[in-house]
Image (cartoon, rainbow, N blue to C red):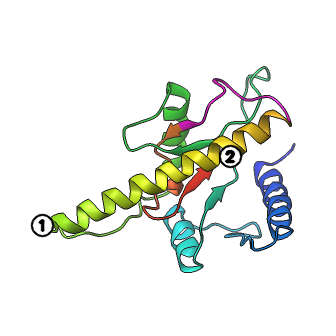
Amino acid sequence: GTREKDVTLAIARKLAAAINAEEGMRAVLIRDGDYFLSLGSRTRKARQLGADMFVSVHADSVLNREVSGSSVYVLSLRGASDEAARWLAESENAADLKGGVPLAEDDLLASVLLDVTQKEAISDSVEAADHVLSALRDVGNIHGAARVRHAGFMVLKSPDIPSMQC
């Protein structure tokens, strides 16, 4: 009877309170209630608010009660790190249409700059996600391989904001 949206909102609020307790840091919840925002609009809103980091809080229910634990994902440009990551990303992405940054097809410089910016954001994402995963180990089980996973989650596809899904 526990609903994912109730769990994730409670976690997000506690995370925001912890972040706001840190000097020089301010958390902003993209959603603070039970309403739909497209995946692309979530990252656009984060960009408009000048976000330095985007964290998507996520919880899955599974039929197999033996499966449990936390995981942390960052964007992969080359595909998922494992079959479970690929399946989860595909099912999540199916809930929304792809957003993105429009570039002229012949604008090679813009494409190269976007690529460099996105690779830097992914590098920063991995570094932050490693810290989060280490902290999660102190709280409970880690699901699957005890490493940061990579997948093509739409919500992580901001080319300029480091992001992770936990």
Residue 70 relative to residue 72: left or right: right
* Residue highlighted by disc 1: 106
Other residues around mark 2 within 10 Å, as few (<14) / some (14–19) / many (≥20): some
Q: Residue at x 77, y 69 (%)?
A: 33
Instruction: Residue 147: name its quadrant.
Output: top right
Amino acid type of the residue tagged 2 in the rendering: Cys
Residues 123 and 80: in front is 123
Q: Which residue is mark 2?
A: 166
Residue 70 at least partly seen:
yes
Residue at the left extreme of this rendering: 106
Residue 124 spot, x, y in % from top left: 53, 53
Q: Which residues are magenta?
A: 139-149
Q: Residue at x 57, y 67 (%)?
A: 42
Q: Residue furthest bottom?
A: 48
User: Which residue lies at the image location 86% right of the left edge and 37% below the top edge?
Assistant: 139
Relative to 100, is 137 above or below?
Answer: above
Please give left or right for residue 95 compared with residue 56 in the image. left
Establish if 105 lies above or below 67: below
Q: Residues within 10 Å of mark 1 (few under 14, many from 20)?
A: few
Labels 2 and 1: the sequence-earlier one: 1
Residue 162 vertical position relative to residue 73 in the rendered view, above or below: below
Camera-side residue of 37 and 86: 86
Give the residue type at disc 1.
Asp
